[in-house]
Amino acid sequence: MPINILMPALSPTMEKGNLARWLKKEGDKVKSGDVLAEIETDKATMEVEAIDEGILAKIVVPDGTADVAVNALIGIIAVEGENAATVGAGAGAAAPAPAPAKTAEAPAAVAAAPVAAAAAPAPVAGARVFASPLARRIAKDARIDLARVKGSGPHGRIVERDVKAAIAGGTASAGAPAPAAAAPARAGAPAGMSDETIRKFFEPGSFEEIPHDSMRKTIARRLVEAKQTIPHFYLTVDCELDTLLAAREAINAAAPKDKDGKPAYKVSVNDFVIKAMAVSLQRVPDANVTWTEGAMLKHRHSDIGVAVSIPGGLITPVIRKAEMKGLAQISNEMKDYAARARARKLKPDEYQGGSSAVSNLGMFGIKNFSAVINPPHATILAVGAGEQRVVVKKGAPAVATVMSVTLSTDHRAVDGALGAELISAFKTLIENPMGMLV
């Protein structure tokens, strides 16, 4: 029996993914453990490995295909004793492309659809149009009738380049559904307008269109959901850093070095922030929670997500049980996570979940800001830059290094008084860092 290669689920919530590229070609021999293909989700790039040896008889879903459903057939391996050509031919006949919108049609109409599309006459009523998900999205935004587009993909399938050619030529819009009536364009028009209406604000040719990738779409969706469904409440305090900076310098100076003189660790201010947030949640356990409609989830450990900027968006790897880890261990974990995050090599269990999060923009000179809560967290700490400020000590002006931090809380789970208790515990630890080292 041939081996079916299915689109893997890289996380419990994954429904679709993008098949970035095949690392094997049809006809290549493969053995157990060989990497066959790379799959992209909104957060990471993962590898699909062969579970047995044989010959890659058929690639069903080609490179660059977006929105492939979990458990969809993407390829076939012919095992020993099977004719790869026969297996591949059978798979090609049986395996559907990633499912487009379903329509009721007669078998004859389905068979004729690719030919009709290639000739680009008036659309056949009830005929099924074969197009990639990306091509469908672009066509929808541009109000293009796919039945009038000539497909250049496998078996006449319409792909991205076909739709863009149709847009450039202006020949495929006849007969397309009329756009919904839109309100007259006006300065400062609100969000929620159609793409076509938004484009009317700008002179044709004065901008470049960059299609959203899956990461940017997911970030946008989750931020909208977070702001619409979570009642945010904000608390800001200023923390003096001079004692912490002296402790950091001493800790780094004491780091053991290898034969090349490279220190075993180099602790940053952000590592202290992560540790302080973790210990604070242990000292104020009622704030170490997640809201659900049926119950409050009270966490035993402080799993702290840390926002990391990557090309095209951001990701939040999680330092698990951060309250139990030393600063050097947190520092080294974060360096590893950040490097693999930028290479999109994090595993789902390394960035999903967590009980709170930290977002630090201090390195960009940002004085203070308010961060959006990332569900399932009930809190997130926004960290600004440490800067020299004049403060009053014992009734006299003095200069101190001060950092402003803002705690965003989900008011359903962490109300104002509880949030104040949490951020007060954090301030105490930052200004007396030895308290988090014992």
Image (cartoon, grey):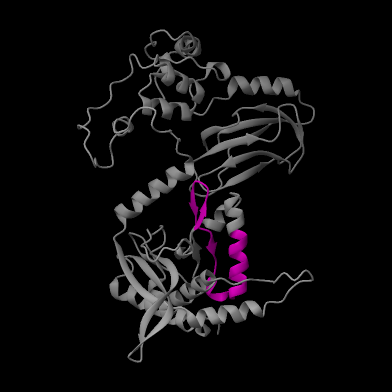
Q: Residue furthest bottom?
A: 394
- Residue 256 lies, in percent from the top left, at 71, 76
Specify start and end residues of the magenta stretch as a single range.
308-337
Considering only vertical position in the picture, is 348 above or below 397? above
Residue sitting at x 50%, y 13%: 114
| Residue 420 covered by magenta stretch | no
Considering only vertical position in the picture, is 157 above or below 391? above
Residue sitting at x 54%, y 71%: 271
- Residue 230 lies, in percent from the top left, at 31, 58
| Residue 333 covered by magenta stretch | yes
Considering only vertical position in the picture, is 306 above or below 343? below
Left or right of residue 109, residue 328 in this image: right
Q: Is residue 347 visible?
A: no
Q: Is residue 331 visible?
A: yes
Residue sitting at x 29%, y 76%: 417
Considering only vertical position in the picture, is 371 above or below 117? below
- Residue 419 lies, in percent from the top left, at 34, 73
Q: Quadrant of residue 22?
A: top right
In this view, the residue in front, 432 or 154, is 432
Residue sitting at x 67%, y 30%: 76
- Residue 179 lies, in percent from the top left, at 28, 25
Q: Quadrant of the C terminus?
A: bottom right
In this view, the residue in front, 330 or 241, is 241
Q: Across the whole image, how many numbered discs are drawn on residues? A: 0
Left or right of residue 231, residue 269 in this image: right
Q: Quadrant of the N terminus?
A: top right
Left or right of residue 135, residue 80 in this image: right
Q: Quadrant of residue 340?
A: bottom right
